[in-house]
Image: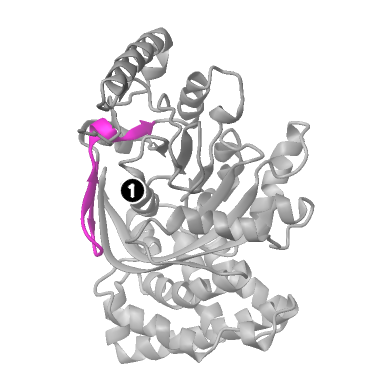
Amino acid sequence: MVRINRKMQLPVSRHSRLFPIAHVILAVSLNLVSNIGLRHGFCVSAFSASPTDIISSSTNPITGAASSKTKRIAIVGAGAVGSYYGGRIWESVRSQSDTNVMFHLRNENYDHCIKYGIDVSSYHGDFSIPAEELLAFPTIDDMTQSVNDSSGGGGDADGTFDWVICALKSTSLEEVPKLCGSLLSPETRLLVLMNGLIEEDLIKMMRKQRELKGLEGVGCKAIYGGMALICSNRLSPGKISHTFGGKLLCGVAYSADANANDDSGKWVESDKQAILDLFEPVTPVPFEFDPNLRRGRWWKNVWNLPFSGISVSMGGITVDRIVNDPSLRKLAYKVIDETIAIANADLMKHGCSEDELLGEETKYEMMTLSDNMGPYKPSTMLDLHARKPMEVKYLFRRAVDRADDLGVDCPHLESLVCQIEAHQRHHNLF
């Protein structure tokens, strides 16, 4: 028996949802062909006329459970980080017919990718998503409309997303509830890959957004925070350069199953297992679950605050120039020490034991990583050079404010943040 087990799809455009009748006819025709083929001892694969028409009863690669509906993963903010992780997930489920990875791409990025696909040159091996297999949408409305069309517009479980992965910058935090809200359901899990201490404000914003609609709660199964310690830049539309790869660390910010009214990061075992099931098949991504998201955020800050901070305060220099200059290297160590001191004070305030605190190993882990990054350009440096809004509030200022609240001195970090805020004001990078 010859089995073709690769999902093939027609190119997606913003106009594809305008032809639901044609989609139905094509789907029925292909289903008849498929049934005939199965009765004669061979299997054929169907072309999907829309990005969400594939329905399968096979085992779901994300949960490992038998499924009768399409599993959907939305990537919102498919830039350097979103395209990389979304692409790796797509790569892991490419041969499966019951899982769709759907990308929200905007402006010239969308226009390029629907013609040429997404190309990633990676430290862990290059890969591409061909245009004919890319499920790309220029707006969230187009994405939700496509899903609604495929589920018959009934709003049942077949029309929901299993995961929404949001990889916007923290400058767009206020947009997350609006952008992601229509993609969420009580069974959807939201992963936010973003820098800075964002969770408290994000959950408040999501609750507020639903209150405005007369609804209660957060609107999803769970919210996770993700800390990506990778060197990934978008060189041009559809072209991603991933030059160095550390681990992806994730933790739970909110769990409806643990306590729908508690925003303190409590979680249950099913929350942990769900994200392990999502990323364990994605073998090129070193993944780790942190039972304490607050600690995970501070862990990432131990790199971000010294290296992104010094890069911007110096007018935009690469990481290799920081680690190879004796004065800047010394400054980096001082900022690291201050960041760890703030982190541990914050963790102890929230009930962590000494065993859960950040130690010297984190300090040397971040310096070793930086020594091997080469001429990496942090995203804040790129934003400074491009005169785009910089991640200042949640990435830099929030850490200093937390230090003030905790009574922790951080003179070197505070000086860096003052310089960064001066760049932001002088160039109007808000």
Is 163 contained in the magenta span? no
Answer with the quarter of the image where residue 134 lies.
top left
Front one among 93 and 249: 93
Residue at image coords 63%, 56%: 270
Q: Secondary structure at mark 1?
A: helix
- Asked whether the viewer can see residue 409, the reply is no
Residue 39: percent from the left, percent from the top? 31, 20
State yes or no: residue 120 in magenta. yes
Q: Is residue 385 above or below residue 208?
A: below
The stretch in magenta equals 118-137
Above or below residue 369? Residue 78 is above
Give the quadrant of residue 31. top left
Name the residue nearer the viewer: 249 or 326: 249
Compared with residue 384, is residue 354 higher up or lower down, i.e. above or below? below
Query: Measuring 77% from the left and 57% from the top, which residue is drawn there?
Result: 262
Residue 59 in view? yes
Q: In the shown orientation, is residue 124 left or right of residue 154? A: left
Residue 299, x across and y down, in percent: 52, 75
**Image position of 212 (left or right of 30):** right
The residue positioned 45% from the left and 72% from the top of the image is 304
Q: What amino acid does circle 1 point to?
A: Gly
In the rendered image, residue 376, in percent from the top left (x then y), is placed at 28, 69
Residue at the disc numbered 1: 87
The quadrant of the image that shows the N terminus is top left
- On screen, residue 150 versus residue 261, left or right, reads left
Q: Residues within 10 Å of mark 1 (few under 14, many from 20)?
A: many
